[in-house]
Image (cartoon, helix red, strand yellow):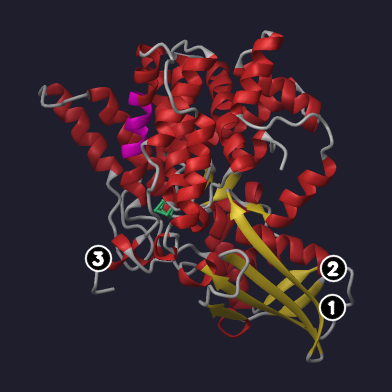
Amino acid sequence: MPLPSILDVFRISIGPSSSHTLGALRSGLLFREKISRHDLNNCHIKIELCGSFALTGKGHLTDKAVVCGLNGMDVEKEGEKFLETYENIVKRGYVDIAGYKIPFNPEKDISWNKNLDSLKHPNTVRYRLLKDGNVIDKEEYKSVGGGMLNREKVKIEIENNAENFKNLSDIMAFCKKNGMDFVKFVSYFMEERYSTNKKKLHLELLKRWTVMKRRIDEGLKKEGTLPGVLKLRRRAPQMFREYLENLRSFRMLSEEVTLTSIYAIAVAEENASGALVVTAPTCGSSGVLPAVLNSIQERYHLQDSKIVDALKVAALIGMVVIKNGSVAGAEVGCQGEIGVACSMASASACYLMGGSIEQIEFAAEIGLEHHLGLTCDPVAGLVQIPCIERNGAASVSALNASNLALLSRAKHQVSFDKAVETMMEIGKDMNIKYKETSLGGLAKTINSL
Ligand code: SF4
């Protein structure tokens, strides 16, 4: 697969999961488009959620997302009202496709198939369109991580015959030859490969940065309980208040890293509540990068344009992983989500602190290396425990990775590309219990659920 677009890494998404919520919603949009050529009178739609979609789909709002997708939801414009829209569809009892009111009752029309054995991909959804009881159209979609569907990966391959960059080492060699840093490379690449000029790219990234910052601001203010059986209380506002108190009483170790961690938790709590977030590279890990960038921006009073450049550096790391690896917890565990988020944040922090491309590569490698083997075992299938705190922990690791890379003058043995290869190898060997199925690990520690 060629290098994807920067906008495949940073998608504006509804929480809590890019693969299980955004990917599921986008599959609904695609099926809607596919069937809109039919005469839809007297038609019904049946949906089968399979594998990890069935095992953790309730907590990840997968069923609600497919219904909103079928009904044509525009995530950027209407995503904030995702749950409200779903409730309205259920109440009125139909989905609206191409002017037809197709009766739909989630209780009867969505089935949950928890069997993983027969699947080519753990995140699979099957749609059938029936007319007078006969199947007249059907489709199967696989959500491969970060909100991307398998069919889009194939499309990128077919459409792109231009120069391909194999991995980060390849890109670094190209940068050296052409006197570019990573920021210039990403701008060049997006123009050449995806016909996105610098101005458009800047505006798209600025839009994403605005959403990221809004999640920090609101996450620090919103009190209450997160959705789901755990009845978890939001902690970011209280932690932030106590942080400020403790600053005054000098009872605070590592103030800056603590604040970064609180920012990450604020975003992760927003994500868990189903708010609009930016995948970086996924929803579950969407707190790490904004926290690190916000913290550095505040400390050094950086302009938003500088943060946009840092987003380009972070995205490049995500792009390479999507190309050569995976960012889906259901494929490789949390190493592909939080591990990659940490790697992206480490690289962008290192860039902001003046790191060379070698030091940035090293920071990205450290960020990923120390998350290798990390399992995905969310309690009750919710993106809450361990996900929320894990965002905080990874944001701190990213600051450290950046510092270590800057202090080590970029000398290291294991390359970032090798770390990605290793992540994939571990992911293949990882027991299915630890790949977003909630069948093992921490998911099993709370027995009363
Ligand atoms: S444990 Fe990690 S990969 Fe799994 S849902 Fe949580 S954040 Fe995503």
Disc 3 residue type (three-letter): Thr
Quarter of the figure with the C terminus: bottom left
120 with respect to 442 (left or right): right
Q: Which label belongs to residue 445?
A: 3
445 with respect to 329 (left or right): left
Instruction: Where is residue 182? Give x, y as percent.
Output: 61, 19
Q: Residue shown at 54%/60% (left/top)?
A: 20
Q: Is residue 221 visible?
A: no
221 with respect to 90 (left or right): left
Residue 96's place in the image compared with 226, above or below, is below
* Residue that numbered label 1 is attached to: 40
**Residue interval drawn in magenta:** 393-400
- Dot 2, crowdedness within 10 Å: few (<14), some or many (≥20)? few
Q: CA distance from mark 2 to mark 1?
A: 8 Å
Q: Magenta stretch mostly in which secondary structure?
A: helix
Disc 2 residue type (three-letter): Ser
Quarter of the figure with the N terminus: top right
* Residue that numbered label 2 is attached to: 36
